Image: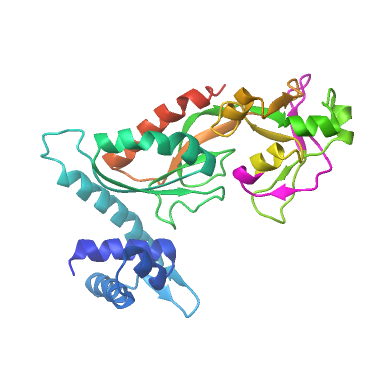
Amino acid sequence: MNQLDAIQIYLRVAELASFTEAADSLGIAKANVSSAVQQLESMLGTRLLHRTTRRVQMTHDGQAFYERSKDLLADFDELKTLFNNQQNQLSGRLRVDMPTAMARGLVIPALPQFLREHPHLEIELSSTDRRVDVVREGFDCVVRVGNLLDSSLVARPIGEYQLINCVSPSYIETYGVPQTLEDLARHKLVHYVSVLGGKSYGFEYVDPLTSVTQYIDMEGALIVNNAEAYLSACLAGLGIIQIPENGATAKPYLQSGQLIEVLPDYRSAPMPVSLIYANRRHLPKRVQAFMNWMIEILKPSVSSAN
């Protein structure tokens, strides 16, 4: 096994913290994964991983080797196309993550054209509402909606989602249209949490007089943890939801009348949309190209941040 292959295997073990999962994701035998890591440790004269029966964790040297190896493989990918006369000829695999509604409604429909322009690219597209671990799970870039946590990752702002309050016609038939914040005491909210068991803050809005975000605790019979269930619950008449006005989720339903905006003077704060990627000295051209393309795809649905 050559050293570059061994390094790629090590990176996947480090990211997944598992020899078994790394073998499954790479489609090779677990014995080959173990052999590759042992080969690197022997060559380097240091232990890269702590192995126990329950988990695999990088040593201090293993973490340093991981970071340098990411740069090395990125440089090697660039080197392979250094003398290619076709400047836009990109190749390799991209692993990306984004919200489910964004992937289904905006990105996947536009992907055929992007892949026609770059036929040697292979894309692994994860679409989930959970916050993936960019480094551990080996993502080249992810789209995050919402405020970012402090981290060592690099954030590239795209814009903001303007949020609106929506209900369905069947909800209005049952509960009427809320006209004031006081009316919400007689209404229902579909509660959204990222992890079931977490706390819902209720109805969120920006006070038009103070510009401060406020929350109103509301009743609601349903708590969901993904965007598709959130939308479906509203369409079924189960309560008020707060979603991006121009996002792939809301726009067609607003145009058809299946969703109706309520309380337009009491919208929640805009949600920032960002591209996140690991901090590297050299970002592969395929990642740069994909991120630039994503920004163009998302432009119509986001507004510029203030």
Left or right, residue 116 beside residue 243: left
Q: Quadrant of residue 68?
A: bottom left
Q: Residue at x 43, y 63 (%)?
A: 16
Q: Is residue 221 magenta?
A: yes
Nearest to the observer: residue 53 or residue 162 = 162
Residue at image location 56% in from the left, 47% down from the top: 129
Q: Nearer the viewer, residue 118 or 206?
A: 118
Quadrant in the picture for residue 3: bottom left
Q: Is residue 295 left or right of residue 44?
A: right
Instruction: Describe the colour scheme in one phrase.
Output: rainbow
Q: What quarter of the picture does the N terminus occupy?
A: bottom left
Q: Tell me, yes or no, whether the highlighted magenta stretch contains residue 70.
A: no
Name the residue: 81% across, 39% down.
Answer: 188
Residues rendered magenta in the picture: 203-229
Q: Say above or below: 300 vs 241.
A: above
Residue 221: tell me if it is visible: yes
User: As drawn, is 45 to the left or to the right of 158?
Assistant: left
Give coordinates of residue 69: x percent, y percent: 29, 56
Q: How many marks?
A: 0
Please identify the quadrant where the C terminus is shown: top right
Observer-nearest residue: 260 or 271? 260
The percent coordinates of residue 246 (x first, y second) are 56, 26
